[in-house]
Image (tube, rainbow, N blue to C red):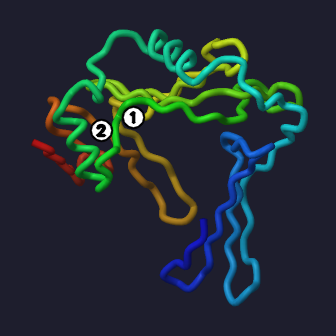
């Protein structure tokens, strides 16, 4: 992905892949101006030798992911939320139904030989959203990461822009979302009803 920012810098982002499969968390960002590189940052990982042929199907992996997630009010089962994603994206085929994407990933010590081929699913329910990684060879759940948090907000200190609040989101009911930005200074409310 490439774009020019407001200051005239070219921002190029690269996704590492191996045998055509993206490596999760392995991206590189190159910043340049007037054809000269000014900044490089990112991760390049040694994933050579990873088997890139899944032993289980996407559907089998999705079943494992949904069993792991447990019973929930899935957003793809709620007509209001299915209409919301179609409207928000402008895509009449958009859906919250989880589609599996193959990635090479590791949730261990990032050493050669510990990487695995996995299906990644974003599972959206009314009060919880998780990213679930399912081993594409065994069906084992490798990792579950939250896509949103309902925990208390906090702040971090940035060397560039000082102390900054962390966003906290809460789903009040099926038709609204409250976002607390910066520890209560700014409140954004989205109502899709």
Q: Which residue is mark 1?
A: 148
The CA span between labels 1 and 2 is 7 Å
Q: Residue 112: image x %, image y %?
A: 88, 32
Horizontal side, residue 112 vs residue 159: left or right: right
Say what secondary structure mark 1 lies in. loop
Percent of width and height locating residue 111: 86, 31
Q: Residues within 10 Å of mark 2 (few under 14, many from 20)?
A: many
The N terminus - image quarter: bottom right
Residue 190 drawn above or below residue 172: below
Can the viewer see residue 151 in this picture? no
Tag on residue 176? Answer: none
Read off the residue under disc 2. 169
Q: How many marks?
A: 2
Q: Nearer the viewer, residue 117 or 163?
A: 117
Say above or below: 42 vs 19: below
Residue 10, by quadrant, is: bottom right
Is residue 83 visible in the rendered image? The answer is yes
Q: Secondary structure at mark 2?
A: strand
Specify whether 16 is left or right of 181.
right
- In the picture as drawn, the residue positioned furthest to the bottom comes out as 34
């Amino acid at each position: 992905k490439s774009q020019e920012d407001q200051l005239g810098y070219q921002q190029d982002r690269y996704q590492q892949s191996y045998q055509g499969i993206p490596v999760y968390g392995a991206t590189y960002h190159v910043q340049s101006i007037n054809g000269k590189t000014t900044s490089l940052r990112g991760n390049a990982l040694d994933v050579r030798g990873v088997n890139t042929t899944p032993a289980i199907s996407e559907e089998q992996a999705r079943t494992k992911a949904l069993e792991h997630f447990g019973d929930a009010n899935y957003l793809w089962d709620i007509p209001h939320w299915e209409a919301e994603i179609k409207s928000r994206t402008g895509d009449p085929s958009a859906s919250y139904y989880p589609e599996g994407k193959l990635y090479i990933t590791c949730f261990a010590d990032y050493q050669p030989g510990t990487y695995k081929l996995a299906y990644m699913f974003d599972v959206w329910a009314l009060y919880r959203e998780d990213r679930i990684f399912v081993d594409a060879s065994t069906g084992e759940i490798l990792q579950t990461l939250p896509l949103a948090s309902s925990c208390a907000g906090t702040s971090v200190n940035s060397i560039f822009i000082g102390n900054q609040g962390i966003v906290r989101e809460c789903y009040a009911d099926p038709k609204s979302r409250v976002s607390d930005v910066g520890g209560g200074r700014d409140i954004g409310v989205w109502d899709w009803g």
